[in-house]
Amino acid sequence: MAFEIHWLRRASNELDAIHQFYSEFASEQVAKRRIGIIIHSVDLLQTMPYLGRMDEDFTHIRSYRYLIVLTYKVYYFVEDDGVYIASIWDCRQGGAAFI
């Protein structure tokens, strides 16, 4: 069974910001490649929704999982037949407070 991927507004905005940053400070080609890698990794969740690790820091809020993609943690949760991408956190920023 394939799960449907849903990008929450925050995650979608963060993906756009990543694209904008690399377009501006590197090149459009670098930006597209990084975004492509993130999207490809997220697409794996359609068939393997429990691929990511549980994030124990946020279990009091919801059962968040995350994938490590490049320098990012892609936070998501699984609900019914959907995978909801909640946030994309750049690990170089330090901390873990994406909520």
Image: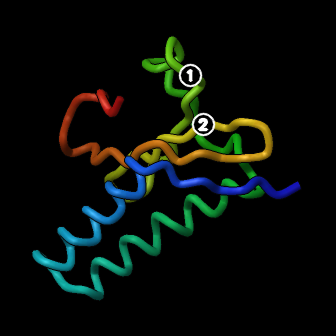
**CB contact under 8 Å: marks 2 and 1:** yes
Amino acid type, callout 2: Phe
Q: Residue at x 28, y 81 (%)?
A: 30
The residue where tag 2 is placed is 77
Badge count: 2
Q: Position of residue 4 (x, y in %)?
A: 72, 56
In this image, 66 relative to 1: left or right? left
Q: Residue at x 36, y 80 (%)?
A: 32
- View extreme (left): residue: 25
Q: Position of residue 60 (x, y in %)?
A: 51, 11
Q: Residue at x 50, y 17 (%)?
A: 61
The residue where tag 1 is placed is 62
- Looking at the image, is 67 positioned above or below residue 58? below
Q: Position of residue 8 (x, y in %)?
A: 49, 49
Quarter of the picture containing the C terminus is top left
In this image, 3 relative to 1: left or right? left
- Looking at the image, is 60 positioned above or below residue 48? above
Classed neighbour count for the residue bearing mark 1: other residues with Cα under 10 Å, few (<14), some (14–19), many (≥20): few
Q: Secondary structure at mark 1?
A: loop
- View extreme (top): residue: 60
- Looking at the image, is 71 positioned above or below residue 35? above
Q: Position of residue 64 (x, y in %)?
A: 55, 30
Disc ID at residue 71: none
- For the residues labelled 2 and 1, the Cα–Cα distance comes to 8 Å
* Color encoding of the figure: rainbow
Quadrant of residue 62 within the rendered picture = top right
- View extreme (front): residue: 9
**Among the two numbered marks 2 and 1 on one chain, the one whose residue lies closer to the N terminus:** 1
Q: Secondary structure at mark 2?
A: strand
Q: Residue at x 77, y 53 (%)?
A: 3
In this image, 71 relative to 81: left or right? left
